[in-house]
Image (cartoon, coloured by chain):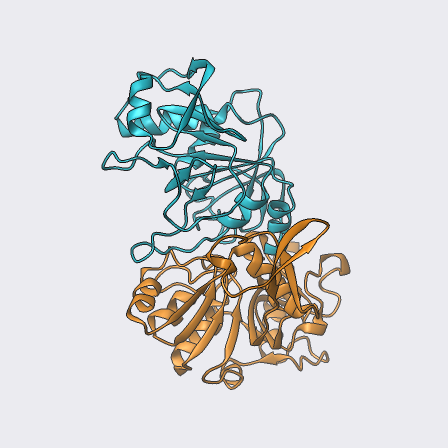
Chain colours: A cyan, B orange
């Protein structure tokens, strides 16, 4: 498995980018998901949706071009692409909850065998609040979890049953880590791809959830 | 020549706006800051617009901090950053309870919550927006799939419609809504700027008294009907903001 932090982030972002289609409306979470936009193929143009009321968000504006009323959902300056729309929070979550967002990419603290996701609090330790995560996971057409395969101490994040408070009872669709691509199916978690420089043994050793190894197990088509 | 004429007109308009906004147009709703603070009382339930400070009426918040109005309940998307927007109320220790979707950007909120000096009720962002909207639109609440089977469901009822389950989320209302508008006309019609909209147009309906801080005041007709985002019927008072 690749350990270099920057490479890990790059692998995950590149692989997630391959899941997005031209014309998709996509909501990207904070952290690794934000990087996905940097790795889209040239012929794939997506519309970024942001919880604070944007469809058609662009990247970080050049210094001096910031506008106090043009920010992303993390509170940092953002830009609007030609054709962008700005709206209120009810409309923004109408898009999200109403199933009008093709995909959401977000981080996770834990994912379990049933495809449940926990990503918004660690009781007694970290209580940032759910923000828009619960609505996104409940309403987006496709939920992609992008995260490092294990915690910093090497323990598993893909586990038999989430012990942290769940974000939604809606099952997620896909898990992308630097070491694996795992699809959530009715039968359980199916290991579809191995990351660069990763062996099947390493995946099994760092994943406590039961994995079904796909008959068609591939290498992630990513180079770093 | 046109430029200098234009400049002169703008200067005259600005002066008139300050002294007697638009001459014969009465602006009954226009409050000075000293008058504004008289509308806020200890223990008030406030709805405050803004998303991480963007679209938050900073000048109104400054006045509340100056006057030390306390034991406030704040309904808002978040508590912004330390010392910014709603973060100023948090830092001053004026908030008894916060009903918000996110406090991750303000460690001072988390500290006060852990110490027990402030109560925090976390609500999913989309649910919060709809609870506020319902409150202002005369609805008892909303049905949403968000939060089903999570801690958000605790003490709430479920219902089933067409074989699908939903959580019943009651509407919420406030004593006073504090908004940040880009433009206001003398009647109280409002527009907002880009991502500064967020909760503002929803909260406008949901309080007994709605007060909007504005950047620019224009005469009747100064906002085209198609551009009005919040109709004047729900706006009670207008206050000029300091920051542009």
Q: In this rendering, is residue B130 above or below A31?
A: below
Position of A67 with respect to A204 (left or right) is right
Q: Nearer the viewer, residue A64 or B85?
A: B85
Q: Residue at 51%, 61% (x, y): give it.
A: B50
Would you say A173 lies left or right of B137 here? Answer: left
Q: Residue at x 41, y 38 (%)?
A: A111
Q: Across the whole image, how many numbered discs are drawn on residues?
A: 0
Q: Position of residue B7 (x, y in %)?
A: 60, 61
Q: Residue furthest left?
A: A153
Q: Residue at x 42, y 56 (%)?
A: A129
Name the side, left or right, on which B87 lies relative to A69: left
- Tell me residue B157's x, y (percent): 59, 63
Q: Position of residue B206 (x, y in %)?
A: 63, 71
Quarter of the image holding residue B81? bottom left
Is residue B219 among what the camera can see?
yes
In this view, the residue in front, A156 or B196, is A156
Residue B194 versus residue B42 in the image, above or below: above
Up/down of A194 relative to A124, above or below: above
């Amino acid at each position: 498995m690749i350990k270099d932090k920057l490479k890990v982030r790059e692998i995950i972002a590149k692989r997630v980018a391959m899941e997005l289609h031209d014309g998709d409306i996509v909501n990207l979470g904070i952290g690794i998901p934000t990087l996905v936009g940097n790795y889209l193929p040239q012929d794939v143009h997506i519309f970024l949706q942001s919880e604070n009321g944007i469809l058609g968000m662009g990247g970080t504006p050049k210094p001096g071009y910031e506008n106090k009323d043009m920010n992303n959902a993390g509170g940092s300056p953002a830009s609007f692409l030609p054709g962008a729309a700005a709206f209120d929070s009810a409309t923004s979550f109408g898009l999200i909850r109403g199933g009008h967002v093709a995909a959401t990419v977000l981080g996770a603290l834990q994912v379990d065998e049933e495809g449940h996701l926990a990503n918004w609090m660690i009781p007694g330790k970290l209580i940032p609040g759910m923000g828009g995560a619960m609505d996104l996971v409940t309403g987006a057409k496709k939920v992609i979890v992008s995260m490092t395969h294990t915690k910093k101490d090497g323990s598993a994040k893909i586990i038999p049953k989430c012990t942290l408070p769940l974000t939604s009872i809606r099952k997620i669709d896909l898990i992308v880590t630097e070491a694996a691509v795992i699809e959530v199916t009715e039968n359980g978690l199916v290991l579809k791809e191995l990351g660069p420089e990763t062996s099947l043994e390493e995946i099994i050793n760092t994943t406590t959830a039961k994995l079904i190894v796909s008959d068609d197990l591939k290498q992630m088509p990513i180079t770093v | 020549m046109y430029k200098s004429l234009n400049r002169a007109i703008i200067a005259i308009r600005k002066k008139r706006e300050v002294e007697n906004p638009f001459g014969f147009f009465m602006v009954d709703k226009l409050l000075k800051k000293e008058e504004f603070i008289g509308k806020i009382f200890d223990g008030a339930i406030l709805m405050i617009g803004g998303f991480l400070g963007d679209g938050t009426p900073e000048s109104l918040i400054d006045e509340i901090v100056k006057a030390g109005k306390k034991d406030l309940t704040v309904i808002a998307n978040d508590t912004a950053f330390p010392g910014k927007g709603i973060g100023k109320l948090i830092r001053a220790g004026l908030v008894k309870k916060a009903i918000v979707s996110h406090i991750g950007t303000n460690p001072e909120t988390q500290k006060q919550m852990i110490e027990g000096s402030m109560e925090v009720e976390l609500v999913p962002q989309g649910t919060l927006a709809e609870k506020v909207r319902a409150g202002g639109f005369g609805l008892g609440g909303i049905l949403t799939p968000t939060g089903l089977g999570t801690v958000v469901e605790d003490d709430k009822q479920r219902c089933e419609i067409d074989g699908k389950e939903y959580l019943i989320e009651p509407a919420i209302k406030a004593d006073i809504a504090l908004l940040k508008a880009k433009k206001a006309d003398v009647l109280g019609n409002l527009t907002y700027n880009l991502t500064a909209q967020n909760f503002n147009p929803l909260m406008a309906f949901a309080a007994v008294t709605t007060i909007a801080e504005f950047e620019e005041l224009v005469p009747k007709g100064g906002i085209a009907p198609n551009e009005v985002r919040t109709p004047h019927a729900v706006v009670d008072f207008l206050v000029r903001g300091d920051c542009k």
